[in-house]
Structures are given as structure tokens and as C-alpha cells.
Image (tube, grey):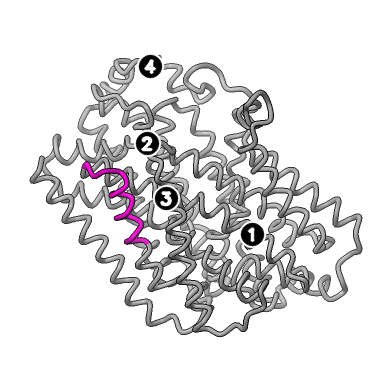
């Protein structure tokens, strides 16, 4: 086993060195803050698609979702269904118009800057609220990625959790710090391909090794009732309620408010590239989500007699790779490459989150809210300092090895989706939306999630625990309602804003 670990370690080292080299190469391309944050809007269709989806799915795809299915059965696939619907809607309805509008609205390079320009936020209230919201929830989101990296290194190499956490954080920090948006998107493209290959090959290989006929018998041997475990209308203990299904499907709403995904739409070279991006992204996400669920089921059967419990369920994919390539097949280097696919999923999200957080602080708070002069060298310096600070704070949040990846992602996804999802949709498709409505929508969405998930209001329980309803449902609905009511009760947008809306709708940008 020691020899196998040596080969696996070699694969990891070579992969991580490649990521850092890419960061160093693209450091030379960052001559301005627009290059660092948006790549000069020169992103190709295929790179944009895989970068958007790889940065979206994170370690949650290969650890959180399979672990949830492993533990509770195929009833957990409703989250995947919701995410697939959300992905399709985001690419079909949001991508094209958002790219147009951000160009027309004073060539905005961040989502908060787009809101400021779209709603003529002269007092920079909306800009400040949006930027602070991004930083708060991306801290939690980045922590989930770092926690996934720590669990990966801990499981594979037996490293102490905090040491493993440090290694993953340092590598992500280095190439994001150096290369900015171009480095992030290029590495995401590589990582997206690696993730897809791994997520397809491992469950197919596992079925080939143990045989289709043994899956049901092995599942039953692990202590589950097979019919219930494979029932998509069951949570493993009983039938789903309407609240359960609504909560899982609601994950799809979050897509409309994810800054690290939305900026990929803004960065695409031209609208022709969007066609390639849409097709590529939808196929990638359909395959990835479907096979992530398959991993949970097949992994439970394949790993028997080993049964993962007490939070170790999220390591099912890792354990499958280790068993396949060190026990069933003596190919540790190949196993190391597939394990790098999990690292790829983790890194592809963490780097994007660090970059978006940096842009919010440097462009939106430092230059926008504080009114500092927008000098490229100073903005780049502030951005890189922010990347470092956010990484350190996320590291501190992730120090608790008991934190689940699924739980951290769930909270961050709800906060960002509730705060920004409704206002992104309304800003693009309802011309009556005004500044007051936008501020009310962002603030109410973010606060609703914080109250719902964190305040023990009912007998020492949060509203989320007491009702079982996902906070994204509540936050998204409240935010949308506030946007409509406040916009209708306050003065309408100016003629200039209305004309800009019509120009974007007609393609005049």
C-alpha cells in the first residue's frame, strides 16, 4: 500500500504543479483589472461552458451528492433534477441578455457593478449591499471547497485534517493569486474534462468488476431495504412529503443568482460562441448529475462489506477509486489521476469564488463604495490581498472537520440565490424594476436566509429545521415579492433606463 500511495502522490504533485504553472503563465496577461476579473471578454464557447459548470459543481458534485444518495437512497436525486432545470434555464434565458446588458450598462465587469449601472445607483447603496452579501456567502462557499480538499487528502494519504486543509488552500491560492480570470477559466476547462471522465468511468468500472447481478444483493447486505432505497419518492426512512420535493427542486432557483457562474456569461467573446456554450454545458451537466447519483448507489454495493457512516458517506467516490485501482487493479497512477478529478472539482469552484470575492472588494467596495481612484495596479494589488484574506477566513471556517460539504454548500447557495436570483431575472426582463425595488430585493433575500437558517426561533430550532423547508424557497419568494411591491410603490425608472432596457431587448448594444 505504501508503494501505491507513492504513485498516487506523484500523480497529485504533477497535477498541482501544472495548475500553478498555468497561473504563472497567465499572470503576464493581466495588464488591467478587466483582464484579471473578466479576461477582457474574450472567452471561447467551450471554455466558457466547462468553466461555468466546473466552477458551479465543486466537490459537492463528487462528494456531497453521491454521499447523500449513498446514505439515503435515490430519493436524493430531486436536487439533481432541480439543478439540471436551473442550468438549462440559466443558459437559455439569462446568458445572452445578461452579456448584452452588462456591455450596454457601461461595460460592467462585476455583478454588483452591473446593478449599480443598470439602476443608476448614484449613492452606491445597492452596490455596497450586493458586494457585502457576496463576500459573506462566498466565505461559507469557499470554506466548503476547502473542507472537501481537506477530506480528500485526509482520506487518501492519512494526513491530519488541518494539514490536508493547508495543502489544498495554498495551491488554490497561488494560481488564483497569480493568474486571475484567465488562469481560473483555463484550469477549470481542464478540470471540467477530468471531472467528467472520472464521474463516467468509475461507476461503469465498478459495475463491470462486481457484475450487475450482485448490485441488489450487496445493497441488501449493507442493511437497506432495496425497493425503498431505489424509490425516488422515498428519503430512505419513508415517503417524501411535498415540502421535501419542493425543497430539493428549489436548488435550481439558485442558478440565477450565482455570481461565479454569471460572470462566465459576461466574459464570452460573442453571441455566436453562446450557442456552443449552451449545448456543451447542458450535456456536461446532464451526464455529471446523473452519474453522480449513480455513484452513490453503485458505490454502496461496490464497497461492501465496508459501510461508510458518521459523515464518511461523502468519501464514497474516493473510496471507490482507491479500492478499484489499488485492490481490484494494480494501477495506482491511474487511480491518482482520477483522484485528481475530485481535487479538480474542489479547485474549480474555490478559485472562482476567491476571484469573485476579490472583484467585489476591489472593484465594487474599494473603487465603487469608497470612491478610490480606479488605477489598475492598485486595484490588482487590492484584489490579490483580498484573495489572501478570503482564503484565510474560509480556512478558519473549514477547520471544523465535522462540517459537511452538503451543509456548507446548501447555506451559501441559498444565500446567493435568494439575494441575487430574483433581481437578476427582474433586471433583465421587467423594465418597471427600479433602484428601490432592487435594494429591497437583495437585502430581504439575504436576510431571509440568515434568519431562516441561523436563528433558533422555534423551541431552540431554526425555522429551516422546524419546517423542513429549504431557505432558498422562502428567500427567493420574499425577494421577488419585495422587488415587485417596492418598485410599484416608488417612482418609475427614468426614461434613460427604459430606453436602455429596450435597446438591450432589441440587440442594440
Q: What element carries label 3?
A: helix
Q: Do the residues labelled 3 and 2 touch (CB within 8 Å)?
A: no
Q: What element carries label 4?
A: loop
- Where is residue 34 drawn, in percent x and y? 53, 78
Q: What element carries label 1?
A: helix
Q: Nearer the viewer, mark 4 or mark 1?
A: 4
Q: Is residue 6 left or right of residue 142?
A: left
- Label 3 and label 2: CA atoms lie apart by 13 Å
From the image, tell me which residue sits under label 2.
314
- What residue does disc 3 label? 145
At label 3, counting other C-alpha atoms closer than 10 Å, the crowd grade (few under 14, some 14-19, many 20 or more) is: many
Dots 4 and 3: beta carbons under 8 Å? Answer: no
**CA separation, marks 3 and 1?**
26 Å
Mark 1 burial class by Cα count in 10 Å: few <14, some 14-19, many 20+: some
On the image, numbered disc 4 is attached to which residue?
Answer: 224
Going 62% across and 27% down the picture, which residue do you hit?
Answer: 461
Q: Is residue 232 left or right of residue 159?
A: right
Q: Earlier in the sequence, mark 4 or mark 2?
A: 4
Disc 1 target residue: 94
The magenta-colored residue range is 158-172
Amino acid at each position: 500500500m505504501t508503494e501505491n500511495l507513492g504513485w498516487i502522490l506523484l500523480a497529485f504533485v504533477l497535477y498541482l504543479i501544472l495548475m500553478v504553472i498555468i497561473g504563472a503563465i497567465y499572470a503576464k496577461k493581466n495588464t488591467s483589472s478587466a483582464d484579471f476579473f473578466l479576461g477582457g471578454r474574450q472567452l471561447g464557447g467551450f471554455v466558457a461552458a466547462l468553466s461555468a459548470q466546473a466552477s458551479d459543481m465543486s466537490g459537492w458534485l463528487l462528494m456531497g451528492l453521491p454521499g447523500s444518495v449513498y446514505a439515503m437512497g435515490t430519493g436524493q436525486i430531486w436536487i439533481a433534477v432541480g439543478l439540471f432545470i436551473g442550468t438549462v434555464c440559466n443558459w437559455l434565458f439569462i446568458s445572452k441578455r445578461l452579456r448584452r446588458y452588462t456591455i450596454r450598462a457601461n461595460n460592467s465587469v462585476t455583478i454588483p457593478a452591473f446593478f449599480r449601472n443598470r439602476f443608476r445607483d448614484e449613492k452606491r447603496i445597492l452596490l455596497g449591499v450586493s458586494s457585502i452579501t457576496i463576500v459573506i456567502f462566498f466565505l461559507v462557499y469557499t470554506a466548503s471547497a476547502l473542507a472537501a480538499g481537506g477530506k480528500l487528502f485526509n482520506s487518501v494519504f492519512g494526513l491530519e485534517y488541518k494539514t490536508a486543509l493547508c495543502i489544498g488552500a495554498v495551491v488554490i491560492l497561488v494560481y488564483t493569486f497569480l493568474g486571475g480570470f484567465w488562469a481560473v477559466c483555463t484550469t477549470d476547462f481542464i478540470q471540467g474534462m477530468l471531472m467528467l471522465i472520472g464521474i463516467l468511468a468509475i461507476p461503469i468500472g465498478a459495475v463491470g468488476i462486481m457484475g450487475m447481478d450482485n448490485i441488489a444483493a450487496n445493497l441488501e447486505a449493507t442493511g437497506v431495504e432495496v425497493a425503498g432505497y431505489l424509490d425516488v419518492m422515498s428519503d430512505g426512512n419513508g415517503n417524501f412529503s411535498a415540502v421535501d420535493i419542493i425543497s430539493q427542486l428549489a436548488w435550481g432557483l439558485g442558478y440565477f443568482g450565482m455570481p461565479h457562474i454569471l460572470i462566465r456569461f459576461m466574459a464570452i467573446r460573442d453571441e455566436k460562441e453562446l450557442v456552443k456554450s449552451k449545448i456543451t454545458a447542458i450535456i456536461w451537466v446532464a451526464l455529471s448529475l446523473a452519474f453522480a447519483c449513480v455513484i452513490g448507489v453503485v458505490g454502496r454495493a461496490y464497497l461492501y462489506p465496508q459501510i461508510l457512516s458518521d459523515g464518511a458517506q461523502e468519501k464514497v467516490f474516493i473510496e471507490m477509486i482507491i479500492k478499484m485501482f489499488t485492490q481490484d487493479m494494480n494501477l495506482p497512477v491511474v487511480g491518482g489521476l482520477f483522484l485528481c478529478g475530485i481535487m479538480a472539482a474542489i479547485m474549480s469552484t474555490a478559485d472562482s469564488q476567491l476571484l469573485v470575492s476579490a472583484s467585489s472588494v476591489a472593484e465594487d467596495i474599494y473603487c465603487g463604495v469608497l470612491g478610490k481612484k480606479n488605477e489598475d495596479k492598485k486595484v490588482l494589488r487590492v484584489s490579490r490581498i483580498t484573495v489572501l484574506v478570503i482564503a484565510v477566513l474560509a480556512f478558519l471556517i473549514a477547520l471544523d472537520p465535522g462540517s459537511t460539504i452538503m451543509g456548507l454548500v446548501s447555506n451559501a447557495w441559498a444565500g446567493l440565490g435568494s439575494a441575487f436570483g430574483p433581481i437578476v431575472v427582474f433586471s433583465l426582463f421587467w423594465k418597471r424594476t427600479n433602484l428601490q425595488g432592487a435594494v429591497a430585493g437583495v437585502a430581504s433575500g439575504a436576510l431571509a436566509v440568515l434568519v431562516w437558517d441561523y436563528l433558533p426561533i422555534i423551541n431552540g430550532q431554526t425555522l429551516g429545521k422546524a419546517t423542513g423547508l429549504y431557505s432558498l424557497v422562502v428567500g427567493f419568494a420574499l425577494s421577488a415579492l419585495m422587488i415587485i411591491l417596492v418598485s410599484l410603490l416608488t417612482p418609475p425608472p427614468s426614461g434613460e433606463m427604459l430606453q436602455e432596457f429596450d435597446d438591450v431587448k432589441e440587440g442594440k448594444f
